[in-house]
Image: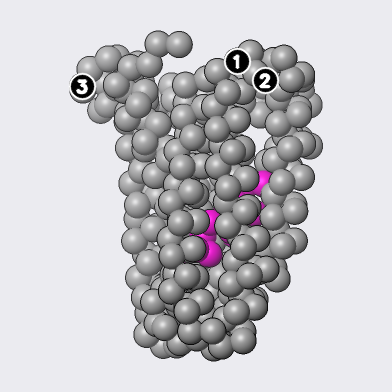
Amino acid sequence: MEISGWDVAAMFAKAVTYAATFGAAGTVFFAIYCGALLRDQQRGLIRRLVGILVAAAAAASILRIMLLAGSMSADMAGMFDSSFAGMILRAGEGRASGVRIAGLALILFALSKNPVFRGPAVAGAIAASTSFAWVGHIHGLAPNTAPSLLLCLHLLCAAFWLGALPPLLIIAAGANQPQIAAAAARFGKLALRVVAVLLAAGASVLLMLIGSAAQFWGSDYGRMMAIKLLAVAILLGIAAWNKLVLTPRLLRGDARAVGLFRRSVLTEIGVGAVILLTTAAFTTFTGPP
């Protein structure tokens, strides 16, 4: 497997696209089910966060297409060559990027204080987070309708989980223990169901892509996927500790639990970044056996 500098750059651009898109979409979801718990200052911070993430996701999506075009020509001029960009866009990346950009544009409605715009913002969050299912290895399966729907479910759940972490960190920074406890409890209750769907959908798609254990361990794709699964297991362990240990302590008024919760969320963000970077790596460098 020969990897060029262009490939590495495209991988990082894809990882940023994942992170910023899931962050923007998940923040919209979080504002829906935890909005009543937020203070005005926190709402302002979350709106600014959404704006930054939307801009980063759009910019990274465009940059990745330019990097792929540059990879095709192996020089900087290729990044700005419309013929190379056209080939990439017609291959499926254009459809995925178009859906993502449209979804990100709708997410910007979340910047408004008017509740009437929540519907378009949620629709945009759904479109943006599932846009990655419009292109990729899943389309090598025939038929691919069921795998694509399962992948969309997996992506939505990932956005719900990972995108909730920055708003939770904003709340935790406020050091208002009753508010932190209420937000952690509400998120944990919903996340229990969401994580179950995420794991079931992800496992189903993986089984469809890789037929046997021998193919899994005998391929670069399988070994990179194993790294991702290990990181997911670590993330699940942290989430379980939050729900079963930290959240009850917060609800009981344990002051020391606030700092632990803040560090726990930061750790989850770090592990989530590893998951997204690994996902970008095996979807850029390899394919299912």
Q: Position of residue 139 (x, y in %)?
A: 66, 27
Mark toward the start of the polypeptide (1 vs 3): 3
* Left/right of residue 288 with respect to residue 15 in the rendered view: right
Within 10 angstroms of label 1, few (less than 14), some, or many (20 or more) residues? some
Q: Which residue is mark 3?
A: 77
The residue closer to the viewer here, 229 or 77, is: 229
Question: Picture coordinates of residue 282 (x, y %)?
Answer: 52, 27
Q: Which residue is located at x 49 percent, y 70 percent?
A: 261
Q: Give the mark toward the camera: 1 or 3.
A: 1
- Gap in Å between the C-alphas at discs 1 and 3? 34 Å
Q: Which residue is mark 1?
A: 219
Label pair 1/2, CB-CB below 8 angstroms: yes
- Please give the range of residues in magenta: 153-166
Image color mode? one colour
Q: Residue at x 69, y 15 (%)?
A: 215
Q: Is residue 208 above or below residue 255?
A: above
Vertical comparison of 93 with 161: above or below: above
**Whole-Å distance between the Cαs marked 1 and 2?**
6 Å
Badge 2 element: helix
Q: Which mark is first along the chain, 2 or 3?
A: 3
Give me the residue at 58% from left, 23% from top: 223
Which secondary structure lies at badge 3? helix
Few, some or many residues within 10 Å of mark 2 (<14, 14–19, 20+) = many
Whether residue 130 appears in magenta in the rendering, the answer is: no
Q: Is residue 156 above or below residue 37?
A: above
Check disc 2 and give the amino acid type.
Answer: Phe
**Residue type for callout 3:** Ala
The correct choice, above or below, for 149 with respect to 51 in the image is above
For the stretch drawn in magenta, what is the main secondary structure? Answer: helix
For this rendering, which residue is in front, 151 or 76? 151
Taking the spot 35% from the left edge, 70% from the top edge, the residue there is 48
Residue 216 is marked as 2
